[in-house]
Amino acid sequence: GPRYGVYLVPPSPAAYADLQTSVATALAALGQKDRAAAFAQSALQSKPDFVPALMLQARMKAAETDITGALGLIDQILTLDSTHLGALLLRGNVQRYAQREAKAAMATFELALQAHPKDVAAHLSVINLTLESGDVADARKRLELLKAAHPKHPETVFLEARFAFADKDFERTRTLTDQLLQALPDDPRVLQLAGINALRLKSLNVAEAHLLKVVKAQPQNPVARQLLAGVYNRTGEHGKALSVLKPLIDAPNADSASLTLAGRFGSDFWNRT
C-alpha cells in the first residue's frame, strides 16, 4: 500500500540480486566471509543466473582453495557467457597458481586476450606467464602488442622499465621509473626496481630513499631488506645494515641469503672497529 505518498514496488529479481551481491562484495572485502556467502546465495535464489554473484562465489571458493568448487562456478559462468573476462582470468589464475598447469593457464589467458584484445590484465597474464617460461623474446613481442593498445599505461611502462634493466640500460630504467613514480609514488614494485637501478648507477642516497619506502610498506619483503642492508654496508653503516636484516635472521625460517649477508656484514663491522 502507499507509504508517505509513495507506492513501494517490489524490486525485480535482477535488481534484488544486484543489491544482495553489492552487500556481499562489501562484506567479503571486510573479511566477513560467512555473511558475504549468505548474501551471495540470497542473490542467486532471486536470480540463479546472476553472473556477478556467481563470480563472487567463485572468487571466494578460490581464496579458500576450494579449487573444485571455484572451477565448477566458473564453468557455470562460461556456459552463460563463453567470453566472460573475469571468469576466464580467474580460471587461468587457478590453473596457474593452484593447479600448476602453465600450458592450460596460457591457453585460457589467450582466450581472454582474443575476446578482449584491449584488456590490460589479459595482456599482463600472458606476458608474465611467458616470462615465467623463460621465453624472453616472445615476452618482448607480446609487450609490443600491449604498447600498441595502451602505450602510456603504468603496467606497460613498468614492463618497459623491467626490460630496460635486463638490458643493462640503467639510464632508461631510471627515466621510466621516475616517470612511474610521479604517478605511483608509493608503488613497492616500482620503488624496488628504482632502488636496485639506483644501486647500479651508484646513487646510494637515491637507492636508500626508495628501498626505505619499500621496507616500510612491506616489512617482510626479504629482497628490499637485503638490498637496503647492502646500501648501508657500502656506506660503512654496518650496524644499520645488521639492524635492517634482523627481522629476517630472527625469523624461525630465516633464509640462507639473509644469514649469509648478516655474517658478511658482521665481519665487516668487526674488521672496521
Image (spheres, rainbow, N blue to C red):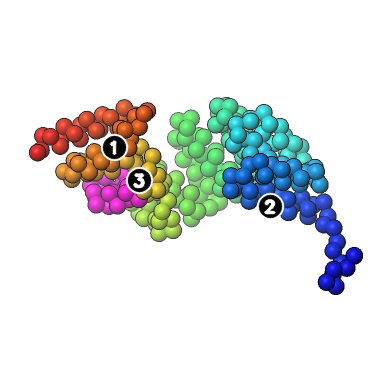
Q: Which of the 4 quarters of the picture holds residue 226?
A: top left
Residue 142 part of the magenta-drawn span: no
The three-letter code of the residue at mark 3 reads Val
Secondary element at image label 2: helix
Q: Badge 1, how many Cα within 10 Å: few under 14, some, many 20+?
A: some
Tag shown at residue 215: 3
| Residue appearing at x 48%, y 30% in the figure | 133
The one nearer the camera, 207 or 39, is: 39
Viewer-proximal residue, 99 or 252?
252
Please state the horizontal and vertical placement of residue 253, each as a whole percent of the image.
37, 28
Which residue is rendered at x = 73% and y = 50% of the image? 20
Q: What is the C-alpha distance between the residues marked 3 and 2? A: 35 Å
Task: Specify the farthest residue to the right.
Answer: 1
- Would you say residue 167 is visible in this rendering? no
Which quadrant of the figure has residue 33? Answer: top right
Which contiguous range is marked in magenta?
194-215
Disc 2 marks which residue? 22
Would you say residue 201 sits in the magenta stretch?
Answer: yes
In the picture of the structure, the residue carrying the numbered disc 1 is: 246
Amino acid bearing label 1: Lys
Q: Nearer the viewer, mark 2 or mark 1?
A: 1
Residue lying at 31% horizontally and 27% vertically, measured from the top left: 256
Q: Position of residue 28 (x, y in %)?
A: 62, 46
Q: Nearer the viewer, residue 163 or 246?
A: 246
- Alpha-carbon neighbours of circle 2 within 10 Å: few (<14), some, or many (≥20)? some
Numbered disc in front, either 3 or 1:
1
Q: Position of residue 64 (x, y in %)?
A: 60, 34
Which callout, 3 or 2, points at the residue further toward the start of the chain? Answer: 2
Q: Residues within 10 Å of mark 3 (few under 14, many from 20)?
A: many
